[in-house]
Image: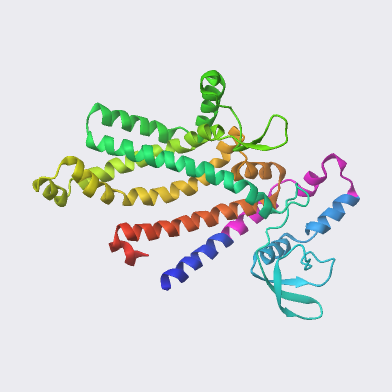
Amino acid sequence: MFWFWKKLGNILITLFGVVTVIFFLFNILPGDPTQMMLGQNENSEQLIVLKKKYGFDKPVFTQYLYYLNDLSLVSYHSKNPENISFLKENKYNYFSLFENKNSFIVVKTPYLRDSYQKNGVSVIEIISNTLPNTFVLAFASILIAVFLGLFFGIISALNKNTWIDYSIQLLSTLGMSVPSFFSAIVFAWFFGFVLNEFTGLNMTGSLYELEDYGENMKLQLKNLILPSLVLGIRPIAVISQMMRNSLLKVLSKNYIKTAYAKGLSRFNVVKNHAIKNSLNPVITALSGWFASMLAGSVFVEYIFGWNGLGKEIVDALNKLDVPVLIGSVLTISIIFIMINIFVDIIYTWLDPRTKNNF
């Protein structure tokens, strides 16, 4: 029970920190969201109306408190239609706890507000449309990374100090050194343009695209190949290095020598005893890499034109669409936290001795 409350406290503190930092950061940076919304059609009267509608006419700290109120499960709302916290039926999903002459206190689902740039489109809707594409990309990348990383790590460990080992280590070092955005540009140009005639791959494209006649959306799995490979390069390198080092350490243990002494073949010793006990550090790193892929996908999605949450974050940054930006980062933070909790559970299953550490 203590473990649960400790984790819950860490989650709330982390999310509170994320919201606070991003909110104040984008309120001190130059730029006016209302001017971005109006574009060339702006005039002083429209600016005043928009500022009042979104609460930009209030002090920054007051805006911050209103935003926390919208995110909170239990929140205060005014009965005055002119107030930004006015309880609109189509705005909040709630039920009332307490009510007086001027206000409500309600329990509701967190409200991430509407996009500044996409009129009438809620942040929840934007995230629900783009996050699945990012999940598909990250999942494909992690599958590639796990399969190839473990394979190369095992081969490298079993062929220690040979040309095979040195070659894999060299490639791993290169994979960790090259930035994802550079790899994305090179892969898109080389495989999507230079070798397009042979590969049939596009330089840009998303999971679903309009057909030639523009009537229906068509699944384009080939557009997944290049971005998932690029996103998986660095994790492949890290996993192969970690698996090699971990497996070499396990192979030097006494119980491995005992298994050999009992007449077990090298294949059975490695398969049944060494690999499982070598996976703990790899799984720990894997949790961080999966979450990092969600963050690292920002540049990869933008370069490949992949319609995911990362590309949406870049668009929100360019247009000062703060609700979309905060909502997207909060979503990634929650996923990051949930993955870490899941990995803690898997870690205790692999090594019960670590149970008391959580």
Residue 170 position by quadrant: top left
The residue lying at 85 percent from left, 65 percent from top is: 82
Q: Do we see residue 51 in this rendering?
A: yes
Compared to 256, does 209 lie above or below? Answer: above
The residue lying at 76 percent from left, 66 percent from top is: 85
The residue lying at 63 percent from left, 36 percent from top is: 218
Compared to 319, does 333 lie above or below? Answer: below
- Horizontal placement of 78 versus 271: left or right? right
**Does the magenta-highlighted stretch encompass residue 78?**
no
Quarter of the figure that contains the N terminus: bottom left
Q: Which residues are magenta?
A: 17-44
- Horizontal placement of 233 versus 13: left or right? left
- Horizontal placement of 254 versus 294: left or right? left
Spot occupied by residue 329 in the image (x, y as percentages of width and height): 59, 52
Compared to 236, does 162 lie above or below? Answer: above
Q: How is the image coloured?
A: rainbow
Spot occupied by residue 117 in the image (x, y as percentages of width and height): 75, 46
Residue 331 position by quadrant: bottom right
Spot occupied by residue 353 in the image (x, y as percentages of width and height): 28, 63
Predominant secondary structure in magenta? helix
Spot occupied by residue 158 in the image (x, y as percentages of width and height): 23, 36
The residue lying at 33 percent from left, 60 percent from top is: 349
**Does the magenta-highlighted stretch encompass residue 39?**
yes
Q: Nearer the viewer, residue 116 or 19?
A: 116
Q: Do we see residue 235 in this rendering?
A: no
Quarter of the figure that contains the C terminus: bottom left
